[in-house]
Image (cartoon, rainbow, N blue to C red):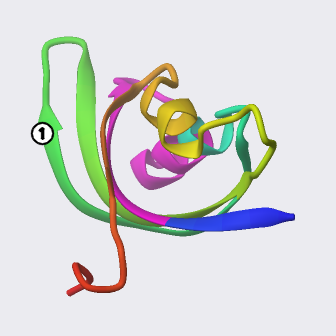
Amino acid sequence: MAELVDARVTLRVPRGGRTALREEARERLARVPAVERVETFDVTGVRPGLNDLRVRARTTVACETDAGTEVDAALAGAVGVERLERLDSESEQ
C-alpha cells in the first residue's frame, strides 16, 4: 500500500535537458526508488546555478511503505534532492 506524501521540495536539475524543465524535475523525483508515482508537481520557483537549476516545487508523491524504509529519509537522501519539507494538513496554504 502506498503512502501519499505532500511536500515542498528543492531539486537540482542539470542545464540543457532534453525536455521541459518542469518535466525534467518531475522525472528526477519519480526516479527515487521509494516513489511509486508523482501525483502532483507544481513548480513554485527556479534559481539558476553555475551548472544546474534549482527548482522549488509543491508535490504529492505516492511512496512505498516498507517497514524498513523511512519515507522522509528516502526522499531527502535521493540524488538531486537538495531540500525536502514534508507538509501536514495544518501547514498547507
Q: Is residue 8 left or right of residue 59?
A: left
Regarding mark 1 in the picture, which secondary structure is present there?
Answer: strand
The quadrant in which residue 1 appears is: bottom right
Residue 39 lies, with reference to residue 29, above or below; the image says below
Q: Is residue 90 left or right of residue 42?
A: left
| Residues shaded magenta | 6-27
Q: Is residue 17 located in the magenta-colored stretch of the structure?
A: yes
Between residue 37 and residue 4, name the one nearer to us.
4
Q: Is residue 21 located in the magenta-colored stretch of the structure?
A: yes
Q: Can you give x and y, in whole percent of width and height, for residue 51 in the image?
A: 24, 12
For the point 33% across and 68% down, which residue is it?
A: 87
Residue 68 visible (yes or no): yes
What residue occupies the far right of the structure in this picture? Answer: 1
Q: Looking at the rendering, in which quadrant would you find the C terminus? A: bottom left
Q: Can you give x and y, in whole percent of width and height, for residue 26 in the image?
A: 54, 50
Q: Can you give x and y, in whole percent of width and height, for residue 48 in the image?
A: 13, 31
Looking at the rendered structure, the kind of residue marked 1 is Arg
Residue 61 lies, with reference to residue 76, above or below; the image says below
For the point 77% across and 50% down, which residue is it?
A: 64
User: Few, some or many C-alpha atoms within 10 Å of disc 1 (few <14, some 14-19, many ≥20)?
Assistant: few
For the point 52% across and 25% down, which residue is it?
A: 78
Q: Can you give x and y, in whole percent of width and height, for residue 91 in the image?
A: 22, 79
User: Mark 1 — residue?
Assistant: 47
For the point 34% across and 24% down, which residue is it?
A: 15
